Image (cartoon, grey):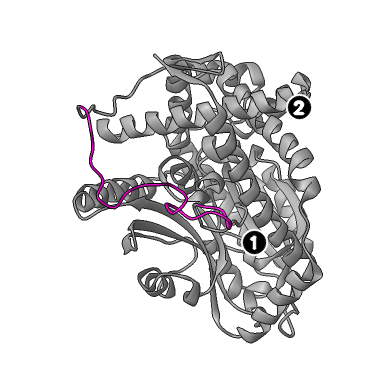
Amino acid sequence: MTRFSTMIGLLAVAAAGMTPVLAQTVSDDETPTTSLNIPGNVQLYGDAKPNVYRPSATVNGEIITSTDIEQRLALIRIANSDMVLPPEEEQRLRQQIFSNLIDEKLQIQEARAADITIDEAMIDQQFAQLAARFRQAPDQFAEYLKSKGSSASAVKQQIRGEFAWDRLLARNVQSTTNVSTEEVEAVVKRLNEAKGQDEFHLGEIYLSATPENAAAVADNARKIMEALRSGGSFAAYARQFSEASTAVVGGDLGWVRPGQLPPSMAQAAAQMEPGQFVGPIEVPGGMSILLMVDRRQVLTADPRDAVLSLKQISLNFAPGTTPAQASELAGKFTEATKTIAGCGAADAVAQSLGASVVARDILMRQLPAPLQATMMDLQVGQTSQPFGAVDEGISVLVLCGRDMPQSASAPDLQQIEQRLLDEKVNKRAQRYLRDLRRDAVIEYS
């Protein structure tokens, strides 16, 4: 269950795919307060002291500095197109980053105590892959990070922490976690009983609220919505701001049915389309921002489950291409690709444009929502409208064939087993980390 995809999601606006996890804040064998001996008529003693933010700490003898925090904050700015945050939101983000860095220290220390070593060459390789996502060599990417107030070492340290924690979980948690046949059969039974019902794949950013601070929390939620509308990464904001346990996986709730959601969330989800987000929505204990990743009907055939045979023709723009030049190139590309009559002619047209061609079979559901809508009505042999970006180039898709789903597919037992296993591992990982926090010696300065 590698978490390097969360690094990609933090730095790239198009976050990597999310892994389903149950949305709960305590484990199955815990209750929120009954395990604590707290009287009903609580009386506070001593002078009240403000919760002062301290910019550095020593975690079991290892230091976290304010520079570490600022460099991680810079990574979030990079992920959100250098967006300027309001001072109060930025300060809250620093506190969350500080908490994340403490957890990261604990994870690396625990892996070290278990004699788990991380090959630095592997870290360098992952860093190079991330640099390639930015179309830069590792050295160039390091300079880019420095110019933005971060550093290569900050990125590599996060990669190191994720590798260490993943390997520790693989040894101490995954290896001793199992899913029984009875558990899988119970899920299959529930799916069959729910056949035809709506099911939503949702992302959530949950913010707790009380009657006293509800207005301020709602205002903060609206600011997050503004950032998302401006191109911010939903997964990155969920990891930093959501107060649900799903924050660690970018706010992913997995596939849920209306009956599993609070009424206000179910009502909102019923009216949402894939790729849409709404909020703030009042829910028990606070407010939520929802992202509709996808929707479907349980065990029911869907045209978006068709397998498309495609050819993608892509023309990359050279570095330094201006918007005006890009527009001119896009115009010529559009006119030329309009003449394509079937996939057999695609290669010749691409060659005349100096463009590349990739042939691939793909599930329609895996395409971005705007392209799904385009491909739904496209006939075999036709070409989609062009799509792309100034800094990436322009592409079209040629539909070579479409295999429609004939009937609803039966539940995939292997996928169900893997999902149940992931949920169990995530729960145990959360308990593991809480235990590390309880035993840690943390000195703030």
Name the residue beneath numbered marker 2.
114
Quarter of image, res 338: bottom right
Relative vertical location of residue 193 with respect to residue 280 in this rendering, above or below: below
> Which x, y percent locates residue 257?
53, 74
Q: Which mark is residue 354?
A: none
Spatial CA distance of label 2 from label 1 is 39 Å
Q: Secondary structure at mark 1?
A: helix
Q: Circles 2 and 1: CB distance less than 8 Å?
A: no
Residue in the picture at 50% in, 72% down: 260
Disc 2, SS: loop
Residue at 39% across, 13% down: 445
Tell me what residue is drawn at x 63 percent, y 40 percent: 432
Q: Nearer the viewer, residue 228 or 322?
A: 228
Residue type, label 1? Gln
* Image location of residue 312, percent across then percent down: 69, 55
Residue 342 visible: no
Seen at 56% across and 13% down, the residue is 61
Disc marking residue 366: 1
| Within-10-Å neighbours for mark 2: few <14, some 14–19, many 20+ | few
Magenta segment: does it hold 164? no
Judging depth in this view, the residue of 79 and 53 nearest the camera is 53
Q: Mark 2 or mark 1: name the one nearer the start of the chain.
A: 2
Q: Residue 183 placed where, x, y %?
A: 73, 70
Magenta residues, start to end: 26-46
